[in-house]
Amino acid sequence: MSTTPVTDETFADEVLGAEVPVVVDFWAPWCGPCRMVAPVLEELSEQYEGRVKIVKLNSDENPKVTGDYGVVSIPTLNIYVGGELVKSVIGARPKSMIAAELDELLASV
């Protein structure tokens, strides 16, 4: 499985209505750190398949969701459980740190 693109229109169904925790990668094509974290998220989407859903939301093309959650810096990884925002991680992080966040999250749900 790989990351799934979401939009202002699909966000509620894909993220808020998901049965598993969801990581939303707020990104933009011009963002260097976003391009660095993208392959890491692809790897993690396979590693956590079935337990965590990882989606990408282009913040330039989807201003409603970006504004609703107050995202002003990208990359921002927002983690949602049961439709609620439970954690935000701002800035690029190495795979090990993102995996540790996911492991901590899964231990608590």
Image: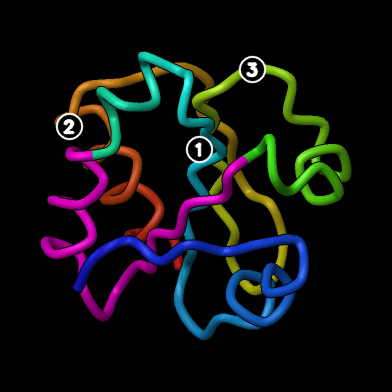
2 and 1 marks in contact (CB < 8 Å): no
1 and 3 marks in contact (CB < 8 Å): no
Give the quarter of the image for residue 83.
Answer: bottom right
Quarter of the figure that contains the N terminus: bottom left
104 and 87: which one is in front? 87
Q: In the displayed structure, does residue 104 sit left or right of residue 89?
A: left
Q: In the displayed structure, does residue 22 sit left or right of residue 10?
A: left
Task: Report how far apart the C-alphas of labels 1 and 3 lie in the structure.
Answer: 10 Å
Q: Return the residue at label 2.
A: 95
Q: Return the residue at label 1.
A: 77
Q: Identify the mark nearer the N-term, 2 or 3.
A: 3
- Residue drawn at 37 percent across, 14 percent down: 32
Is 49 magenta? The answer is yes
- Give the number of the mark in front: 2 or 3: 3
Q: Secondary structure at mark 3?
A: loop
**Image coordinates for residue 57, horizontal then vertical, percent:** 57, 50
Q: Which mark is residue 73?
A: 3
Q: Is residue 73 above or below residue 98?
A: above
At label 3, which amino acid type do we have?
Ser
- Residue drawn at 76 percent across, 40 percent down: 66
Is 50 magenta? The answer is yes
Circle 1: is it few (<14), some (14-19), or many (20+) Cα within 10 Å?
Answer: many
Give the quarter of the image for residue 2.
Answer: bottom left
Circle 3: is it few (<14), some (14-19), or many (20+) Cα within 10 Å?
Answer: few
Q: Secondary structure at mark 2?
A: helix
Q: In the displayed structure, does residue 64 sit left or right of residue 59?
A: right
Give the quarter of the image for residue 51.
Answer: bottom left
Q: Which residues are magenta?
A: 39-58
- Residue drawn at 76 percent across, 61 percent down: 8
2 and 3 marks in contact (CB < 8 Å): no
Task: Report how far apart the C-alphas of labels 2 and 1 lie in the structure.
Answer: 13 Å
